[in-house]
Image (cartoon, rainbow, N blue to C red):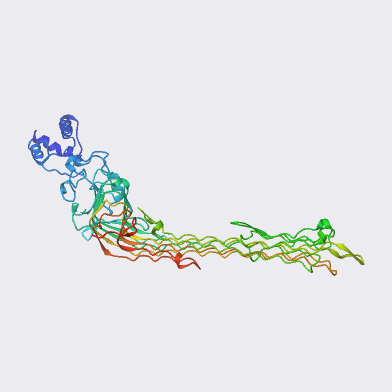
Amino acid sequence: MSSKAVGKASPLLTGGARDEGGAGGAQARGAARRRRAWFQLSSWAIPSASAVAALHLAGCWPLSYSERCEDDSRYCPPAGTAGGTVDPGPECSGDPTQDANIVTDRCVVFARASAPSGGDGTKARPYSSLAEAIEKAAGKKPVLACSSDAFSSGGTFKESVTIGVASEVLGGFDCNAGWSWSAEARSMIEAPADRVALTLTDDAGGTRVQGFAIRAVDATAPGGSSIGVAIADIEATLTKVGVTTGNGMDGATGGTPEAALNGTSAPAVVSNACVGPAAVFAGEAGVTECDDGESRGGLGGLGGIPGMDEGNGQNGQDGTPLPAENPDGTGLGGAGQLATQSNCARGEDGAAGAAGSPGLPGNDSDTALTLAGPVGGNGRSGTSGTRGQGGGGGGGTKGGLFCPAGANTVEGVGASGGGGGAGGCGGRAGTGGKAGGSSIGIVSLGNKLALAEVTVTVGNAGNGGVGGDGKPGGLGGTGAAGGEPSGKVGSKQGCTGGVGGVGGDGGPGGGGRGGHALGIAYAATPSQAPALSVVEQGTAGNGGIAGLGGPTESNGAAGVSGACWDFGAQQACPQQ
């Protein structure tokens, strides 16, 4: 080639203006054909230094060249490869932390927290989100993260990162020094509150994470946990990773329900003495519908009618529900006045309902370890009290010769007894306090996780929530007074119905379990103690106490603290 041809090569390669008219155009078209032929032969391969020198001597290559994508399009990834979805090829095999030659756009995907948004994962335009870089790499290329320390301004990835495919995610690269790697440098992840900082799901088996400082901040939601790393039952490796967790939050206090319904009083509707025989009726009773059924007072006894049953007053009906055993005769209807008696009997007051039981405490017997941390350990709700018994109806009085008829008296009916009041409804139970939030460096649902040079700093766990108070039972309704007498000698007022029984008090809720403060938590027993160092050990949370009146047995269990806890066996991990 002539030196004149060489002079034309530079603008063609650097995107300068081309004159394709006349002789100059012919030369340009020839150079373009040669360039296309070269690209076809190279198939996007980068020529060696010796090849470049030979081409230069032949007059087909400029004297100076650059391997930067911005200067020479042959060094850019193929079109459509943003995110590293194209197979990088065998020349990219190796470990980017050990071989700087593969720290290239073709071989890896780059992420830098301080980069502008909208990057494509190249060295010139790294992703600003580590999660996005991992997603776009799709496990086909390692993801390199810029470090954030005194020697680099890569920034902190303030996000919760989830890995859902086998991946290599490598931190500790100084993006201000050609993305050189340092064994001491760390890239930083800091998750938002109440989010796990780094999660490896079931499909991420074989993942390697290296060179990161991972931080979970203090929880903010009631019962929220601070979890640094959570890994499914998969094979995975953490190397040169420091995990710091914040404090868990106290569990929420159990709820206190609405007040119980009081029993309905018996209405003051009853027949008086000396009404016509057809107008005699029993005193109406109070009725209340409760959660566990109906409480009803007894009807008042009918006033006696001359010529029927010797004119005796009738007994009041019993209030319901009747106790299975009733040695005290609660809620029984009052006796009617007999011809041989001086008066009727008042209805008996109904029995009180039974109090509810306190709720069971929260502990680890119902706690499961998940990728979100421990789930369960809430205190249980108490049971509600039962409804009170309705009061018995009052007895009716006898009929007799006491009804005024002008200046005389004639026989007439007696006054009916008043109805009994309904029992109060049982108090509803308090709900259990919620478990306290935990502070756990690493959660592992299996026992295949490998650790090397991993440190954990653990925060304090939250206390269990206090159980909610139960509500008192409702008051019993009052019985109604009996019918009015005639005002003449021998006529008596009908007897009053009994008062309904008080509903039983609702049981208090149990206290919630205290949160755990653990370096690492396993759902399955590990074969040996994990190789991690706990830099600082936080304290476990106290169990929440039961609601008002609850026994100590209903207080929640305290959480546990330590370097390692086996949730499957509910004990500390085996020692090395």
Q: Nearer the viewer, residue 386 or 219?
A: 386
Locate residue 405, reporting x and y percent. 90, 64
> Which quadrant of the structure image shows residue 346?
bottom right
Horizontal relation, residue 84 to residue 9: left or right: right
Horizontal relation, residue 381 to residue 528: left or right: right
Residue at x 16%, y 44% (from the top left corner)? 67
Reply above or below: 165 against 561: above
Q: Count numbered badges in the picture.
A: 0
Horizontal relation, residue 401 to residue 117: left or right: right
Q: Quadrant of the N terminus?
A: top left
Q: Quadrant of the C terminus?
A: bottom left
Locate residue 550, reporting x and y percent. 49, 67
Reply above or below: 11 against 490: above
Residue furthest right in the image: 407
> Which quadrant of the structure image shows residue 2?
top left
Residue 245 in sight: no
Residue 456 in sight: yes
Q: Nearer the viewer, residue 140 or 285?
A: 285
Horizontal relation, residue 104 to residue 363: left or right: left
Q: Nearer the viewer, residue 451 or 474?
A: 474
Q: Nearer the viewer, residue 194 or 206?
A: 206
Locate residue 303, reporting x and y percent. 79, 61
Reply above or below: 415 against 196: below
Locate residue 338, reporting x and y percent. 79, 64
